[in-house]
Amino acid sequence: MTPAPAPARLACAGVKPADLALLRIPSRPAIRSDASLVVAVSSPDLENNIYRSTLLRLSGGAQGGAGRDRFTELTLGPRDSEPVISPDGTVVVFLRAAESGPAQLAVLPLDGGEPRSRTEHPFGAGPAVFSPDGALVAYCAAVPEPGRYGTDDAVQSEAEPPRRVSRLAYRLDGEGFVLDKPKQLFVLDPNGSGPPVQLTDEPSGASDPAFTGDGRLLYVRSTGDDELTSEIAVIDLPARDSTVTPTRGERLIATAGSAAMVTVDSGQVFYLGVDFTGIDAVGRTTGLWAAAIAGGEPRRLTDENSVEVDRAAGPPVVVEGTVLFGAIDRGATVLLSAPVQADRLPLGGLGWVLGGPRVVRSFGVSGRTIAAVVADGSSPGEVVTVTLADDGTGADETARSDFGRELADSGIRPATELTANAPDGYPVHGWLVAPAGDGPHPVLLLVHGGPHSAYTPAVFDEAQLYAGAGYAVVMGNPRGSAGYGQQHGRAVVGAMGTVDVDDVLALLDVALTRPECDAGRVGVMGGSYGGFMTSWLCAHAPDRFTAAISERAVNAWDSFAGSSDIGHYFARAYVGDDRDAQWRASPLAYADDIDVPLLIIHSEQDWRCPVEQAQRLFVALKRRGASVEMLLFPGEGHELSRSGRPRHRLQRCDAILAWWDRYLPV
């Protein structure tokens, strides 16, 4: 017989595991000149164990109920995503996939008609970008070696010849082996019927295409095998009906480190990049860069020490002499503007288009109208529109969607800002999400991954889930996090498990002085770097915690350096080459000091923090009789908690709450 839930948990209002099905996440908006827009909205389907996504259309000026616009279905899915509208506004190109299998490019007339599938790549196609005249789209797609991955019907996968590996970067979490299927650049006539044309044959692949407007195409490529640095290359577009032999383009811009998300306008190339040499890229701020398309040295427009451009918000967009981009600021992501012709942008010279304690997840532009997806303390993502004013700020902001209403109705809890000072006086910043009702409540300290990442004030489904179960959730951005300047981000290089520990414990101590929090009942949990911190805290601050959950963690730097897809540089960059130093920085080295009941959660196909990281710690603890369990998810990679199969995500949530109910009951 299944036991009934504890009465205290029944009485606690808030988000529950099954409410994962209520998540509705809008994609980057595609907007045309009449202010109508198209957005893909994705939601987990727990019953069928897939993510369903359809394209929704908002006609310009159509007002719906409750002050929100009325979206109508443009497609039926089941998995439609990444819409882009042609420059003339007549068609939308998007990615379409069946319930299983890769996504391919499809074309749909916006004034009526049926979608047409235009690609048949074995691993699917990437998102498309239009040429200025709308005659072509460019995209990237993986090109497998002949005889691999089903390209030869007579050769099954287990009968393929062995892979000859001669470089360090030969596989990638979530994608598998990449040395035998690099991504290449393709162009396609979206309104025609001809096949796509492959332009590049880059050994390490191509990414981030951008049309120049003068018959050429830019893209990003690695500067060499196993190099973290990249450069911007250029290749000529083929003449119509010509025979094309894929080749390598010519280098156009030698960057100061790395480049991504290229945009061309006003005779300049804008891109997002990090300034570094060798492998010393970790913890550094991403900047907005510009270079003349005719050639020349790139210049960094944003301040390296204080402005952290957010790649997740998307590529820079130029509007009438102004360039727009997202930036991380103390957990929030704001949309900023700057003059196109500037040589360097002081922070005081930037225009704030969308700001406040929220996260601009993506944005699209038509004329001076900007459509953005914004997350805040009440929703994980809504569409808003704003007009770019002459002074570079935003005006007439209007909420256009209400996708988060059902989740909000389940009981979203607010995030209260916290500040603290570490023992050395360093300021620490974060949030507390407390359950409904009087405290004191048991407390969970959450540590984010990265470490160069950040918690935000926006709705975080996991924090809401734990608060809904009756736990007060403490989330902070210790030294090593993004969004507080480069010195903050690089403070843990060669020093993991030192000042970052001081910071999270200082924030926890401030939270524990509040009446909502029970200082005698505290758990700790985190994933990836947060898993490392959890394992580390179990050994180095065991008296602070009743129990712990360590997910997809780095527990041993020595083996991580060789088994992780990024370990060959990540371990060296953060910890160093010395094996004794790597061992001293490994939670596994202190396994004998861990007496806190520990649940280890890992995915069997995790290539970022491979499963051996979990197994080694589990065996070390189990052999000495410690209280430890390991939960392994088949078929999942490093992103289980964010984009794993919906049913696995639900099972993970249930297992986490069951562990806390055992050791930290409400």
Image (tube, rainbow, N blue to C red):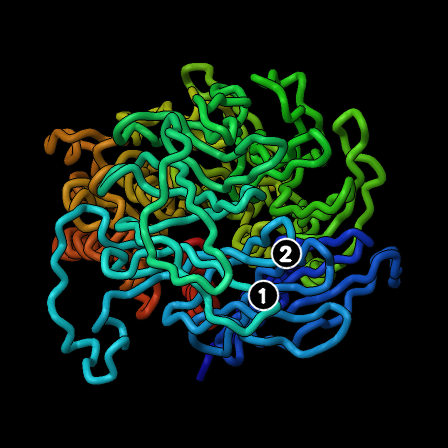
Q: In this picture, is 650 found above or below 219?
A: below
Residue 143 located left or right of residue 626: right
Q: Secondary structure at mark 2?
A: loop
Q: Which residue is mark 1?
A: 190
- Quadrant of the image occupied by residue 623: bottom left
- First in sequence: mark 2 vs mark 1: 2
Instruction: Point out residue 173 in the picture as x, y percentages from the top left corner.
Output: 32, 56
Q: Nearer the viewer, residue 59 or 457?
A: 59
Which of the 4 quarters of the picture holds residue 661?
bottom left
- Label 2 sits on residue: 134
Amino acid at pointer 1: Pro
Q: Would you call the spot at circle 2 few (<14 residues within 10 Å), some (14-19), or many (20 or more)?
A: some
Left or right, 265 with reference to 154: right
- What's the residue at 53%, 33% (across, down)? 269
**Image point (29%, 37%), residue name:** 223
- Going 58% across and 60% down the picture, which residue do you hit? 82
Question: Residue 430 placed where, x, y %?
Answer: 55, 34
Label 1 CA crowd tier, 10 Å (few <14, some 14–19, many 20+): many
Q: Position of residue 397 (x, y in %)?
A: 81, 42
In the rendered image, which quarter contains the N terminus?
A: bottom left
- Secondary structure of the residue carrying numbered label 1: loop
Check contact, mark 2 vs mark 1: CB within 8 A. yes
Q: Residue 608 versus residue 537: which sits nearer the camera?
A: 608
Relative to 300, does residue 188 appear above or below in the rendering? below
Can residue 665 be seen by looking at this rendering?
no
